[in-house]
Amino acid sequence: MTKFFATTALALALALPANAAQVAVGDTLADNQELSFWILDAIKSLDPQKNTDKTGSYVLAQLFEGLMNEDAKGAMVPGAAESYEVSEDGLTYTFKLRDAKWSNGDPVTAGDFVYSWQRAVNPETASEYAWFMELMNIVNATAVVKGEMTPDQLGVKAVDDKTFQVTLSTPTPYFIKTLSHTTTFPVNQKVIEELGDNWTQPGNLVGNGAYTLQSHNLGVNAVVAKNDNYWDAANTIITQVDFITVNDQNVALTRYEAGELDWFNRLPAGQYPRLAEQYPDQASTSPQACSYAYIFNLSDKGPEALKDLRVRQALSLAMDRDVVVDRILQGGQKPAYYWTHWAIEGFEAPEIAMASMTQPERIEQAKALLAEAGYGPDNPLAITVQYNTSEDHKKIAVAAQQFWRGIGVNATLNNVEWKVHTDRLQNQDFEVARYAWCGDYNEASTFLDWFRTDGYNSGKWSNAEFDKLLADSKTSDNAADLYKQAEQILADEVPFVPVYHYANAQIVNADLRGVPYENVMENWYAKDMYRVAE
């Protein structure tokens, strides 16, 4: 085995706390060490293996701890594992777990990780993220997910109580980057078997993170409080985090300005310029690894019109991305002509012909394509566009409706709540749907894998050449070139309309320290933060 540490920070972690809150020289701690954080939607699940959205991830990162965490710049640092080794062939990872306890006082063991990872791929769990374990290239993951092997045949084992070993089917350079994802978090087998689906309720949930679940009023708020059994509780300064659900971002901004929120990380469209001027020490914008798009339903349940490439091309051409980012959002976002976020580490963007055209040129070409497809004034194309509740999503959907009307398309808008929206996406009960994908780790495959035939892929587009490029990238010395080719296939086939790449336009109370502004993955841990006295 070759001793390997992901970063200098990891090597130092053997002697120092792993990225714990380090109070800067000259800072005086405030008496109040509670934090209130805004979330848009009700939390769909607090089960790490069943969570599918960013909102849930924010909360789960406080309640549980995976093998690795991320620092303020997104580099991997120790979590539940204090070190690891990699075999010479790059196929076996052996993690040494630190001495840690569950919130109920039980020791955290390698067996807990074995149980949890097997649970993630077990078809009986019905995890929507089981495919993520396949993406990690763990031996037999795909066969287990398909029900062709039993979960105990997954390539993971407990060598002893403090040694967790993972065997991969192929060397995977991004493997370590996947280990801060919620799907890989450990869960307590005894509690789940005893309580069933009720194990995630307040008073029942047992985690290994820096905080415990105190209350959860669905769609209103969830409160987590410091876990005294956490291995680094002595260096955890924030005592409580209140995740407050506010569906209307304008109302959320009002509540921030009234002092009811400390951190609001999705500023309403168009508000950033004013706030940056009014609150220069609080408002900021930085790249965030998410891409916003309209997904086409290309499954058998989708409309026949969208099966025509010319129709899809026309709809993409007519989308005026500059209007969306410059007039509607105004928060540092960039127009998108491809899927992977431009700030992803090592990503090389393809040359997209549409990107160099003027909008009038795009409109002219879009109208010609629709005419070729048989649509025009006497036979207008009609589509239904679904989006989930949010004033920003509504503004963009209304704009898209106008853009498409300009080429003779009648778009009907359909607003639904988040849970309904995601259920319909999962079941292909839509025609065109607003969607955003946030990377699960800082490498292009986390975006491109979404469109793999067996990926999340809500629109059920399928392309064998695309699938092969992604498969080949896993063992390629030049994965970036294969990713660029895959992006070109997406641009040619148009299974979606890329709209914009996210920027995190946010406003944070000036007394809060440790906010990871430079982490494009937007992963954060309250244990790394503190508040200073004014």
Image (cartoon, rainbow, N blue to C red):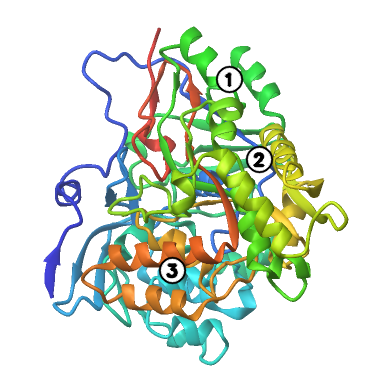
Left or right: where does residue 14 sit relative to residue 284?
Answer: left
Instruction: Work out whether 304 lies above or below 266.
Output: below
Position above or below: 276 against 16: above
| Residue 164 against residue 487 in the figure, above or below | below
Sequence-wise, the earlier of marks 2 and 3 is: 3
Mark 1 vs mark 2: in front:
1
- Separation (CA) of disc 1 from disc 3: 46 Å
Residue 421 x, y percent position in the rendering: 74, 53
- Is 332 displayed left or right of 245 in the figure? left
Q: Amino acid at mark 2?
A: Ser
Could you tell me which secondary element the residue under label 1 belongs to?
Answer: loop
Picture residue at 43% right of the left edge, 27% below the top: 285
Q: Nearer the viewer, mark 1 or mark 3?
A: 1
Q: Nearer the viewer, residue 33 or 518?
A: 518
**Quarter of image, res 474:** bottom left
Residue 271 showing in the rendered view: yes
Residue 315 is at least partly visible in this image? no
Kindly identify which residue carries mark 2: 215
Q: Are marks 2 and 3 in contact (CB under 8 Å)?
A: no
**Disc number placed over residue 433 in the picture, else none:** none
Mark sitting on residue 112: 3
Compare marks 1 and 2 and give the one earlier in the sequence: 2
Query: Extreme right residue here?
Result: 378
In this view of the protein, which residue sits in the foreground, 59 or 504?
A: 504
**Which residue in the protein does label 1 denote?**
271
Give the residue at the far bottom of this rendering: 148
User: N-terminal of the two: label 1 or label 3?
Assistant: 3
